[in-house]
Structure formats: C-alpha cells, structure tokens
C-alpha cells in the first residue's frame, strides 16, 4: 500500500499522547522489523507493526486512525518479547485503540451484529471482543 503522507505533518503532541497512553517511548524504535517478523497477524494488517511504529514516531495520528493494524493486533505480545529496544509494542497498539475508543467511537457496533453471529460465538469471545472494540 502506498503511503500518502504528503499532507501529514509531524505532531509532537500526538507522539506524547501515544507515549503517555502506552507507557512506552516510540522514539527509541530503530526500525529493525523484528516485530513484524514475529507478528502472527501481519498478513491481515494494512501496515506492518514496524510501519505503525514509524508512523507513531512521527505522530501521524490521522494516518494511524485510518488503518486496521491495531484493530487486527491480537495482543499476543510476541513482538514485545523480541523487540531489541525493549518496547512493549502491544501496549502501543492498545494506546492506538484507546485513542479511538476514548472519543466514544466503537470499532464494532454490538447492536448491528447478526443474530447468527451472536448465537454462534462463545460468550467469552463476545465479551473479550466488546472490551477491545467498544468504548
Ligand atoms: S522490534 Fe522494536 S525496534 Fe524493531 S521495529 Fe519493532 S518496535 Fe522498532
Ligand atoms: S501483540 Fe499484536 S502486533 Fe505484536 S505480534 Fe502480537 S498480534 Fe502482532
């Protein structure tokens, strides 16, 4: 996917917000891509975890909020345990989800889910999904 960043600018406040919410420092990422290599969900993502870290380093929050990477993240922490800079990338992904959810924007709308889906899914999966995807 091409990266249309020409109309985007460095946002120091966005970098600070991501760091505050995650408790991590995205600026120390050295773009080695170990996280992407470890990620079991990378094939499902618009942009790899490495690229998301790169966007985060520049505070490209508008771009970040357009993509699906952090919604696809399974919070498995495989990336975090192998990051040579000690960044808990799963926490960064959670911070990016929170930036949407704290604006009272749900990623899924439970009321719009098909009855068949609700009937077929295990309750624990539904509850976990609602925690992750709704504000
Ligand atoms: S593994 Fe760590 S240092 Fe390497 S690209 Fe991912 S976040 Fe950056
Ligand atoms: S925590 Fe998320 S980004 Fe990291 S390896 Fe697991 S699915 Fe991929």
Image: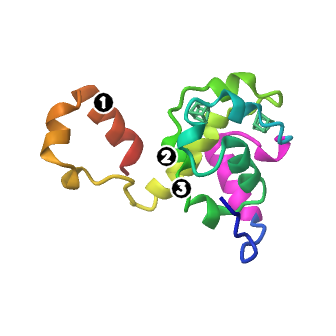
Quadrant field for ligand 2: top right
Residue appearing at x 23%, y 32% in the figure: 121
Q: Are marks 2 and 3 in contact (CB under 8 Å)?
A: no
Q: Is mark 2 within 8 Å of ligand 2?
A: no
Residue appearing at x 67%, y 42% in the figure: 49
Question: Considering only order in the chain, which callout, 1 or 3, is on the residue closer to the N terminus?
Answer: 3
Question: Considering only order in the chain, which callout, 1 or 2, is on the residue closer to the N terminus?
Answer: 2
Residue appearing at x 36%, y 49% in the figure: 134
Residue 88 lies, in percent from the top left, at 68, 32
Residue appearing at x 72%, y 60% in the figure: 59
Tally of marks: 3
Residue 24 in the magenta stretch? The answer is yes
Residue corresponding to mark 1: 125
Q: Secondary structure at mark 1?
A: helix
Q: Secondary structure at mark 2?
A: helix
Say the numbered circle drawn on residue 99. Answer: 3
Question: Label 2, label 1: how many angstroms apart (C-alpha)?
Answer: 15 Å
Residue segment shown in magenta: 12-29
């Amino acid at each position: 996917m091409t990266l249309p960043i020409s109309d985007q600018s460095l946002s120091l406040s966005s970098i600070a917000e991501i760091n505050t919410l995650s408790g991590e420092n995205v600026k120390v990422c050295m773009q080695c891509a170990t996280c992407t290599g470890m990620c079991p969900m990378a094939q499902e993502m618009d942009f790899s975890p490495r690229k998301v870290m790169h966007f985060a380093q520049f505070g490209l929050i508008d771009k970040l909020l357009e993509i699906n990477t952090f919604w696809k993240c399974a919070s498995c922490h495989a990336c975090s345990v192998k990051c040579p800079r000690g960044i808990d990338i799963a926490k960064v992904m959670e911070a990016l989800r929170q930036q949407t959810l704290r604006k009272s924007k749900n990623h899924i709308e439970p009321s719009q889910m098909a009855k068949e889906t609700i009937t077929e899914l295990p309750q624990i999966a539904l509850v976990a999904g609602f925690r992750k995807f709704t504000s």
